[in-house]
Amino acid sequence: MKIFFLLIFFTIAIVQAKAQVTDVATFQETAASFTKKGDYDNAILVLNKALSLEPGNKAVLKDILFTSFLKRDFAKARDIGETLIKRPDADAQTYQMLGSTYNAIAENKEAEKLYKNGIKKFPNEGVMYAEYGKLLSDKNTDDALKLFEKGIEADANHSSNYYYVAKLYAQKGEILWSLLFGEMFINIESFSGRSTEIKNLLLDQYKQFYLTAPDKTYSQSKATDFTKMVAKVLSDQQQQAIFGLTPESLTAIRTRFVLTWYYSNAKQYPFRLFDQQRQLLREGLFDAYNQWLFGPPSNLASYQLWQKYHINDFNEYMAFVKSKIFKIPEGQQYKVF
């Protein structure tokens, strides 16, 4: 009889434990819906209830940290963040959120210390380099650039480092690598406000490229052989640019680049971005890809007209980009100089 009651007791305990976990997950989902609506107070109320069920739950505490940050309750966000990073199970995202909190209250020294520790703890997390570089970018662009490049070496598929490098290289007149990093960024992060920004940058950088005779510039510099070769093959298409750069002329330029590159250079210099371009060319989607890249910044009305008369091409490219993950393999992080 005692065994029977013990079995009942343990069964009830297990059911209650499972229900409690379910309740915590349900509370988090409810809080997330409040957060999406901008109702941060109700989100915090619900998350506090979840925390009362499981004190110390890291996921719930991170949700409270994030929601407090959005609510601009930086004191609370800071307290929770500083508590979380002391835990052995602290993750890179927690460091990122606490760093954002420090930045919001102009605690730059604390943020810098945090990012340095974050890189030591998470040397393969690209977000740590991106956040630290972003902090430094206003006062020391060279150091920021080094951090972004290290972030790309450490975590080749984190998008933010490509975003910041493309912009900094554009500022420094390093046109070719602004183009390469910018297009890689768009292929990793295709549908954000930042990708729209970089599309505009790409079109402008192509115009600058064909205004500055870059093949001669790179051939006389300390640029790597890869950089020089890309500049030369791209510069050989100069004739296609004499009547202006449009999505159509850029499609022609870039098609000839891909064909030439894979005839003479691809084995020596494998590069994921060029593989992507060749795959799109083979599948008949390269024109749609170039329209999607350069159409909106070039002439939005013309792009919308193109979409109207090429709806199948557009839909096929959208299906492609949404079904494929653009992953950059190791060993393709070529140096600029």
Image (tube, helix red, strand yellow):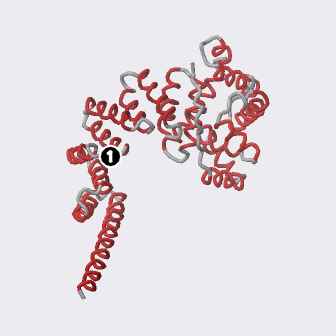
Left or right: where does residue 247 sit relative to residue 42? right
- Would you say 176 lies left or right of 279 here? left
Which picture quadrant has residue 175? top right
**Front residue of this view, candidates 127 and 211:** 127
Using residue 182 as the reference point, say whether residue 75 is left or right of it.
left
Q: Circle 1: is it few (<14), some (14-19), or many (20+) Cα within 10 Å?
A: some
129 to the left or right of 253: left
Residue depicted at 61% across the width and 12% down the height: 221
* Position of residue 102 measured from the top left corner of the image (x, y, whole percent): 27, 37
x and y percentages locating residue 335 in the rendered image: 57, 24
What's the residue at 50%, 33% (across, down)?
Answer: 152
Instruction: In the displayed orientation, state which residue is furthest to the top.
Output: 220
Question: Quarter holding the C terminus?
Answer: top right
Q: Quadrant of residue 15?
A: bottom left
Which one is nearer the viewer's eye here, 237 or 7?
A: 7
Q: How many marks?
A: 1
In the rendered image, the quadrant that contains the N terminus is bottom left
**Residue at (77% x, 30% y) in the render:** 260
What secondary structure is marked by label 1? loop
Estimate the x, y position of residue 287 in percent, counting from the top left. 72, 43
Where does label 1 land, which residue? 90
Q: Nearer the viewer, residue 17 or 119?
A: 17
- Residue 37 lies, in percent from the top left, at 35, 59
Q: Amino acid at mark 1?
A: Ala
